[in-house]
Structures are given as C-alpha cells and as structure tokens.
Amino acid sequence: MPGHFHAYLWTGIGEELRLEEERRPGTPEFPSSPVPPIRTADWLARPRRQVTATFETPADAVTWLAQEYDLATRALLHPADEARIGREVRLANAAALLKGGADIQWGFWLTDGRFTSVGVVCCPSRTAVHRCPLMIGAT
C-alpha cells in the first residue's frame, strides 16, 4: 500500500480540457496549469499548491472523495447517467483500488459547460517517477 495519498480537485470550463500542451509533463505550460493532467499520476509533477489535501489512509481519502462527489452531483449535466453507477459503487471501488495502490480519477460534466475533476493519487506512485510534491518521506 502507498505511504500516503494526495487529493486534487479542478472545476473549470470543459473546453479547457482540449489544451493538451497544458496537460502533458515536459511542456512549458504544464507546471503552472490548473487543468488536470492527461495521466492521473502526473498530478505529482505539479507544484505543491495544487495538492488539495493529503491523507494517510485509503479510508480518509475515500471520505474526501465522498464529500466531493456529493458536491459535484448537485450540478451534474446528466444526473441519470451518473445514477447508473452511483455513489456506493464509486466509493467501494475507490477504497479497493486505493488499498491496492491504484489512483482514482473521476470526471463529471456539470451545468453551464463546466467540468470537474476529482482525483486521489497514491504516493509514491506505481506508474510515475515523480517525487512527492510535499516531500513527505524525502531523505
């Protein structure tokens, strides 16, 4: 199991997701962009100010995911589509995946052309070589 978990949250104009140069590490735009990276683990390559919260356990991370899910679902563009998956399935899957070291990334289209991205990244990552943005466990 990972040492800890970083939470990331972005809500913005959905069209901004097309700005791929801002979403790929190694481009000049990437470090300063708030737009979610294409690969979830690449959140770790962003500045520490973009970390919304940090958790020691998967259970604490899932509690945060539940709160953000509840906020997002108040403004869903297509609530019936999300109802097919639902809160309990999402949270149960998130708990199991985080315990196994897999990152969580949820994205929802909201009203007025907005999009929200809710993610939890395992740190250290199994899929990326980025160091911890908060330097937790750094020697």
Image (spheres, helix red, strand yellow):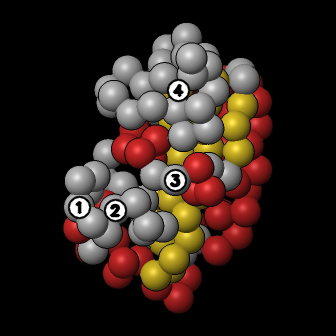
Crowding near pointer 1: few (<14 within 10 Å), some, many (20+)? few
Q: Which residue is mark 3?
A: 47
Q: Earlier in the sequence, mark 2 or mark 4?
A: 2
Q: Which residue is mark 1?
A: 27
- Three-letter amino acid code of the residue under disc 2: Phe
- Three-letter amino acid code of the residue under disc 3: Pro
Between the C-alphas of marks 1 and 3, the distance is 14 Å
Between the C-alphas of marks 2 and 1, the distance is 5 Å
Between the C-alphas of marks 4 and 1, the distance is 23 Å
Residue 123: which disc?
A: 4
- Residue at (52% x, 53% y) in the render: 47
Q: Quadrant of the N terminus?
A: top right
What is the x, y in percent for residue 39? Answer: 32, 45
Helix, strand or loop at mark 1: loop
Q: Are circles 2 and 1 on residues that touch, CB within 8 Å? A: yes
Q: Is residue 85 visible?
A: no
Residue placed most toward the observer, 95 or 45: 45
Q: Is residue 124 visible?
A: yes
Q: Earlier in the sequence, mark 2 or mark 3?
A: 2
Helix, strand or loop at mark 2: loop
Residue 111 falls left or right of residue 88: left
Q: Are circles 2 and 4 on residues that touch, CB within 8 Å? A: no
Please determine whether, in this image, residue 100 is positioned above or below residue 10. Answer: above
Between the C-alphas of marks 2 and 3, the distance is 10 Å
What is the x, y in percent for residue 21? Answer: 23, 67
Residue placed most toward the observer, 27 or 85: 27
Q: Which residue is mark 2?
A: 30
What is the x, y in percent for residue 135? Answer: 59, 32
What is the x, y in percent for residue 74? Answer: 70, 69
Crowding near pointer 3: few (<14 within 10 Å), some, many (20+)? some
Helix, strand or loop at mark 3: loop
Q: Which dot, 2 or 4, sits closer to the camera?
A: 2
